[in-house]
Image (tube, rainbow, N blue to C red):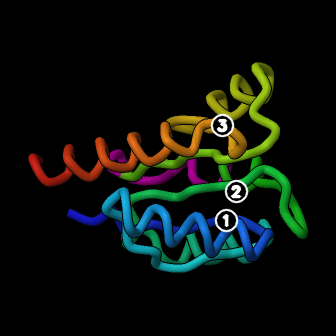
Amino acid sequence: MELRTFFVEDNATIRENLIGTLEELACIRALGWADNETDARAWLRKADDQWDLAVIDLFLKQGSGLGVLEACRGRSPGQRVVVLSNYATTDMRKRCSQLGADAVFDKSNEIDALIDYCVQQADARSRA
């Protein structure tokens, strides 16, 4: 089963590579993307229950991934939100967790862990 996934990432190269990698290796289907907080919040509000996973960067062209994360707090129980950032410090991981992130991954050295997480989530959905 594919995870219907929304991406919040302002770097086009990273976004395109990430989407390609996750579609190939992790059973996800990209529904769309936003490069700023306002557009991300609007899409998530409009899409409501149409997505399974949101992958959010913290630093955006406008606004913050923390604001997007906060906007996901009212999501359905089966929806997952992960943060993928170069700024995955201990304090930031704690803050993301407080705002409801299901997981936080460092862009520079935890892409394999993100792939594993996505595969696990897709497997869990197919068994449910």
N-term mark: 2 or 1? 1
Residue 74 falls within the magenta-colored stretch: yes
Q: Position of residue 101 (x, y in %)?
A: 57, 38
Residue topped by disc 3: 109
Residue topped by disc 2: 68
- Between the C-alphas of marks 2 and 1, the distance is 8 Å
- Between the C-alphas of marks 3 and 2, the distance is 23 Å
Amino acid type, callout 2: Val
Amino acid type, callout 1: Val
Question: Height in image: 103 above or below 46?
Answer: above
What is the crowding at mark 3: few (fewer than 14 residues within 10 Å), some, or many (at least 20)? few
Q: Which residues are magenta?
A: 70-78
Q: Position of residue 54 (x, y in %)?
A: 52, 58
Q: Which label sits in the foreground, 3 or 1?
A: 3
Residue 34 shown left or right of residue 92 in the figure: left
N-term mark: 3 or 1? 1
Q: Quadrant of residue 109?
A: top right
N-term mark: 3 or 2? 2
Residue topped by disc 1: 8
Between 72 and 114, which is closer to the camera in this rendering? 114
